[in-house]
Amino acid sequence: MAEVKSLIGTQNKKGQTFTDPWKMLHEAPRTPSFYTGSEVIKEAVRRSSCDVMIAYPITPQSEAAALIGELFAEGYIGDYFRGESEFAVMSQCAGAAFGGARVFTTTAGPGTMRAMENFPMWAGARLPIQMIVTCRGINSPLSIQPDTLEIAYLLNTGMLVWHAETAQDFFDWILKGFMVSEEPDVHLPLALCCDGFFVTHTKDVVNLTPTDMCLPPYDPYRSPVPCMDMECPPVRMMRDPFVMKSNYISYATHASWQQEIWAAIERSRKHSIHWLNGLIDTENTDADIVIVASGTAVSQGREAIRLLEDEGVRCGLVKIKTLRPWPEEEIREATKNAKHIFVPEFNVTGWLAKELRASIPNPQRVHAGPHVCGGMTMPPEIIVSEIKTALGMKSFSLAGRGS
Amino acid sequence: MSDYRVLPGPEHFLPPAAASMGIRLPNPGEGHINGVIVSEEKAYEEAARQFLMAKVPTIFPGPLVLWAWNEKAAKKATAIRHLFNTLKECVQPGQKPMLIPMPDYRPKYPKINPEVEINPNHPNLTIWHNKIDCCMFVGVHCHQANLSLKIIRGGTSCYTIAMCAQAGHEDAMLSIRDTSVEKIMKLADWVKKLKGTVQPKLATARNGSSN
């Protein structure tokens, strides 16, 4: 491999010091700051040594994309431009990543869907692009409000998929995401999702690392595929005889290729555990009732647990941080004592409950719900109500509240 | 620890990726044999033993060591040449060590010449044609190596070794990670050390690898 001298300890053109990522994220002093989620994205990217950011406006990610444009104006990003559409943006991201750049982009809802063809291509080409997905409704009738249905579509693209609960998660995971997805045995794109508006447009106290520290730059020579050059351009893989012909070798190569992507997701497991301190967080998993959730549904679940405790009902909580890799073993262990498992979700299909049911013994324990969708908020009281109803306890409807 | 073992094939029409079967890559200082984590020293010894047992032990150096694009690559190439020469010195009559370079991965259309080359898309052709029963990948980009290793495991009975500059390969029967000039030389030392102590499988070996 190429001999790349470590840049740690040296400075970039903005005077930031390339810092050991573990030290930067675990040992450096943190400053509490009152920011929206979009502003937090900007602050994370400021510290990411990002080469290229490509933008296209769609609510609720537009603000983050615009703020990163300011970063470019300030000189923190190598290149920044607006694509013609979401599909164009994701294709242009691929081009930049093929060329050896650390690439970042943002999207939401229908934009994610419009660009969807690119995501398996990113994974198949082993491009470690980081994409922020600020989830919103994708279906008709039109909604710009948070709804996590689009995550269901991302789960089978071959990308890593993480689901942040808070702006603090977002800040840390953007930086950690580059560390995991750029490992040579992983080297896959990352869809880092959050529930739009609830995270992007809400102010929260976020502990930020110093602005004068940044990640070491991406090293494209650690890629598991050749860097782009005109002698061996990766685009040739689209023109290879194994794709164009139908014979055993063609099948074997294409099949092995696809399997390799999913093998790389498996390999990301140990790196994700290392950087995220586990794929799940748990509380009180010895309880008979456990809430399993990802994203802001975790926050609602946490509050529901507090309300239930007031009524003498003890509940546990499992916060799922990574959906790909899917933390199957961890969830099996965390739910082994649960008689009832509740899965609150911000989508109509209940994709998380389906994943969970496929992973654990006695899946009839899983109560898929409550669900809200189309961007509707989920009061913790409806989680409480769902749990009490399932337990045969008296529960009052919230529907007439305030009328 | 997974019960699955990465063994010489032919395993299946479409074998699973070993990582999906629970095989994990070694940490620094470790290797794996058949998917079981072992000390790096044990992996060197076993790799040398497999080379000396094989009828046609073959080294496939890839572009990361074949092109002198930096000083380190050139030194690795020299070390691999030393390993091959050592292997030639240490084998017994009837054994036929080979060195088949893999200078690039571009598809050879309309067909490859398996006499002289391998690329990740056609490893089984080269292995069948040359009756290779033990091979080692070194200097091959990880993704391309994994494709080859799986195709080999699927369609041939060849024993595969991967010396990887990065994290190693679960799809090989034996893998050593963080490969450096020193580690290649160490493997050569193990080959020399085991010279004459290993019985080649000449009598029992099939006439080349099966398909």
Image (cartoon, rainbow, N blue to C red):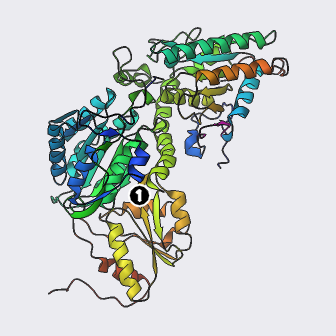
Q: Nearer the viewer, residue B179 or B4?
A: B179
Q: Is residue A139 above or below residue A236?
A: below
The chain letter under disc 1 is: A
Quarter of the rendering containing residue A4: top left
x then y, percent, for residue A152 = 34, 54
Q: Amino acid at mark 1?
A: Lys
Q: Is residue B24 above or below residue A240?
A: below
x then y, percent, for residue A43 = 25, 49
Image quadrant containing the C terminus of chain A:
bottom left
x then y, percent, for residue B138 = 57, 22
The answer to whether residue A360 of the structure is visible from this angle is no
**Residue A187 falls left or right of residue B155:** left
**Residue B26 falls left or right of residue A363:** right
Quarter of the rendering containing residue B173: top right
Magenta residue span: B24-35
| Residue at 78%, 13% in the rendered image | B91
Residue that label 1 marks: A321
> Mark 1: few, some, or many residues within 10 Å (few <14, many ≥20)?
many
Q: Nearer the viewer, residue A378 or A206?
A: A206
Q: Is residue A80 above or below residue B58?
A: below
Residue B28 magenta: yes
Q: Main secondary structure of the magenta part?
A: loop
